[in-house]
Image (spheres, coloured by chain):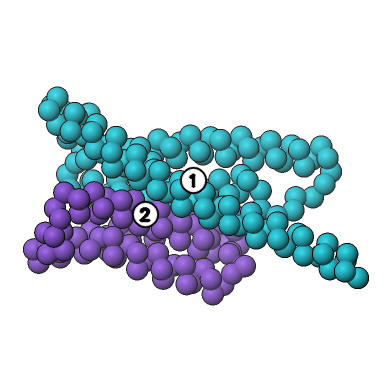
Amino acid sequence: MACFLVPAAEAVVTTIAQKRLAAKEDRAALESGAEKSGISFSSKLKWLNDLLWGGSALLAFEHLWHGEITLAFPFLTNASNPADLSMMLHEMATVGTSMAAAVTAVWAVFAAAVTAIEKKARELPEEGAAEA
Amino acid sequence: MTLLTVVFAAVIATVIWYKNAPNDNMMVGTLCLIYWGASLMWLVDAVFEFIELKEKFFTPAPAEMLNDLYLGLSAAALGLVIWLVMLLIKDPKNVVRQTILKKLK
C-alpha cells in the first residue's frame, strides 16, 4: 500500500544528519590538522542511507507495478477514500515501521562489528610494541 | 519470488564487491546496499504475508509466481539503472569528465 514511505521518511532524516555530520567531521579535521583515520561515523551512516533509499526505491517500484501509486493527486490509490486510507495507515504503522526497524537494526549490528574490528586493529600494533 | 530474485541479485553484487575489495572504483558497494536494503524490506513484507496466509504462503499460483518473478527481475534491473546513474554522476574514475573535456578541446 504505502509501507515504503516509512523507510523513505527515515532516509530523509538520516541523509540530512549524515551530510551535517560529514561537514562537522571535515571542519574538525581541518581545525586539528590531524588526518582522518578509520571509517568515520558519517561514512557508516551513508551505508544506512543507501540501504534505506535503495530499498524504498525498489519497493516504490513494486507499488507502481501493482497500481498502488498513481501520477495524479493524492498519488496513492488507497488515499482517495477514508476506508482504504485507514487500512493504508495501519499498514504503514505495522509493516512500514518494521521494515525501517529491521534495516536500521541490521545496519547497527554491521556498523558495531566494523567499529569493533577497527578498535581491535588499532590495539594490535600497541600490544606488539608493549611485548617488544 | 520477488524476494528470492532480489536476494540473488544482492548475493551476486556482494560476491563481485568482495572479489574487487578494497578497490571500489565501480561503486559496487552501493549496488550491494541497494539490493540488501530491498531484500530486507521484502523479507519483512514476506513475514507479515506469512502471518496472514499461513501455509498458503508457500503454495502460490503459477501465474502469480511468474508475475512476481517478472517483478523481481524488473526491480533488479531498476537497481542496476539507479547504480549506473549514480556511477556516471559521481564518476569516480573521472571518465565522463575527461571525455567531455577532450571533446571541448
In the rendered structure, which amino acid carries the disc numbered 2?
Leu
Left or right? Give the position of A122 relative to B21.
Answer: right
Residue at image position (64%, 56%) is A116
Residue at image position (27%, 50%) is B45
Nearest the eye: A39 or B48: B48
Q: Gap in Å between the C-alphas at discs 2 and 1?
A: 14 Å
The chain letter for the residue carrying disc 2 is B
Q: Is residue A64 above or below residue B11?
A: above
Left or right? Give the position of A2 relative to A19.
Answer: left
The quarter of the displayed image where residue B80 is located: bottom left
Q: Which chain can be seen in purple?
A: B
Circle 2 is placed at which residue position?
B40
Q: Is residue A5 above or below residue A48?
A: above
**Residue B89 rendering spot, x and y as whole percentages:** 52, 52
Circle 1 is placed at which residue position?
A49
Residue at image position (25%, 54%) is B46
The chain letter for the residue carrying disc 1 is A
